[in-house]
Amino acid sequence: MKRKLALILAVVFVLALFAGCSGKSGGASGGGSSAPSGGGSSAPSGGETAPSGGGSSAPSGGGSSAPSGGETTPSNDGPYKFAKGNYDTDAEGWPLEKYEYELPISTTDEILTNMTLSFTPQYLPEGGMGDLPIYMGMEEMTGVHMEYQVIASASFSETLSVMEASEEMCDITAGFWAYHTGGSLSQAIDEEIVVNHYDYKEYMPNYLRWAKDFQWVDAMWGNVNNPGMEKWIGMTDFYDEPCQTTGYFMRGDWLDRLGLNAYDANTYDDWYDQLKAIQVAGYCEFPLQVYSNIDAYANVWNGFHTTPYTAGCMYLRVIDGVVNLNGTSADDLTLMQYLKGWFDEGIISPYFQSMTGLDEITADVTNGNCGCAFFNPGEILGTETSCVEPGARFDVMKKLVVNEGDIIHWHLDPDEFGGVGSSVAGTCENIPLAITWLDWAYSPFGADYRNWGPEGVYWDYNEAGEREWNEIMTSFELGVAWATMAYLQNPMDSGINSWTRNYYYEGGDRLLKFFDVWNECLDYYDGAYNYPSAIKLDDEDSAEIANLRSDADTFFSENYVLFLLGDKSFSEWDSFQKQLGEMGIDRVTEIYQEAYDAFMGA
């Protein structure tokens, strides 16, 4: 399951704080007889002093985006089993292979603290996150004692700001770069609110190897401006395999009666024909339901090389060296005119502006009010079961083009990021240990354990020798995908997110095939119009853009949709663009253009 962060963060949770963030010594949290045995014995107490943080262990920079090469000194003396100095690298410093840690990593009694959030706090044990079997097992195996402070998503930014101001940051914070509001991320590193993870890269061989394997080098530094890419804000949560994660589904049972098949639709006109057939047959009055912002994740109308996203001008593209934003080009006018035709015929539901979340969409679908809606595959079985009409079936649609044989040039790259990730605080007293504990979750064994947990708790092997979720997971009222987030790898934390795990149950193989259909678009997608993600703005430009967009995006969101609704005539398009430009979008575009020109000329 992967709902994009914009939807996930809208969920409001209420959860008390489980532990303070200032403790650095004492007994281990969690524990208990139900903890599974792992690759090492339980961590004995140790009397040796923990290594200090700071920059003394930082390797030289050098200006390259790759880690620096050279020999390092093995660092497994004493109570720690760190990776530094114990793996081979290429000439640029990249680990040659993933690293499997000798466990336990630590034999001391020191305690690290970890601030994160739970998407489903009502399912946590009474004792908190640390009492979940997976975290108890992790503590026993790694020997690293961790106290978890779980914060409601609605108050996470506020809580983080208070902790930053009071210098009471937890040793590890999930989602720092998504929730930090007190200045730029670069400043957060400079002010030592969080450490520069680049300085500790020799302690994270698995993270580096994943990034290198999937060419995620740019992601490692968390959008911090630095020409040498020597500022890394944290460690990102990655998918183990990049994938398309969401799209539209048609009522396949209705199409069967009409002699049609969702898979046969290759163009938007093909899609229109199928929707029109559903409407004419009387199955529903308004066959297509869309989210209130029309294109929630900018991954449906990409055949027009843009998106009708209504909430703001935030998507960049480059055509023949010219930068522009969504909603401001001739392609946007063409797309809006096309959609207006659908809206006028009742293909698009006139109630779409009330579709602000999954609950509204699902209610409309299950009541039979529409025949096509936007879903994640993990939501399909539950939706089908909930439909008032017995035998309802939803079939996946391809990523479409305008004309047969077209190549899509914009914004259909497979998703690489499973969530957000974690950062280590500058006040952490044992930074190498915190970094190592995070890196263990990227190791072959650690990544597998974080995604599945101990055998026999949530999963077992079936007769074919394959893993299969047990009843605890398959009966979870929110679905298996939510269960994996509740009990196992949390996408807000660092680690590897194995998205295919969400479908290891009866009927799941059908859902996995939906991803194969979406991934067919890679045969007719080249990303030629994508704005280079490696371009980073400095703090001054970022601040100016944020200031300009505040009013401009409000104006855009209030007026752009009026062309679809018919409250604005297309004869007003040029004046709308002029006003939008004068409100700051022209200057925003200019800043991005200057950054692009400088990047291409470098």
Image (cartoon, rainbow, N blue to C red):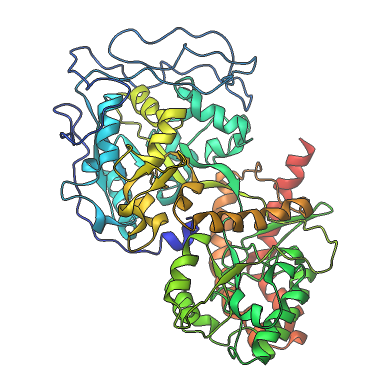
Describe residue 126's horizontal placement relative to residue 349 as left or right: left
Q: Position of residue 78 (x, y in %)?
A: 29, 9
Q: Number of labelled discs?
A: 0
> To which quarter of the image does residue 147 belong?
top left
Which residue is the extreme one toward the front? 463
Residue at image coords 60%, 34%: 217
Classify the position of the C terminus by image quarter.
Answer: top right
Q: In this orientation, which residue lies closer to the viewer: 89 or 262?
A: 262
Q: Position of residue 281 (x, y in %)?
A: 66, 91
Looking at the picture, tell me which residue is in the foreground, 82 or 172.
82
- Within the image, what quadrant is residue 210 found in? top right
Q: Is any part of residue 391 visible from this angle?
A: yes
In the image, 417: left or right of 433? right
The structure residue drawn at horizontal position 56% and vertical position 67%, both measured from the top left corner, is 296
Q: Position of residue 370 (x, y in %)?
A: 56, 82
Q: Residue at x 44, y 53 (%)?
A: 505
Residue 137 position by quadrant:
top left
Q: Viewed as shown, does residue 142 lie left or right of 223? A: left
Q: Is residue 443 visible?
A: no
**In this view, 12 is above or below 74:** below
Q: Is residue 171 above or below residue 200?
A: below
What is the x, y in percent for residue 372?
Answer: 59, 76
Of residues 459 and 323, which is closer to you in this image? 459
Seen in the picture, residue 514 relative to 583 is either above or below; the reply is above
Residue placed most toward the observer, 219 or 126: 126
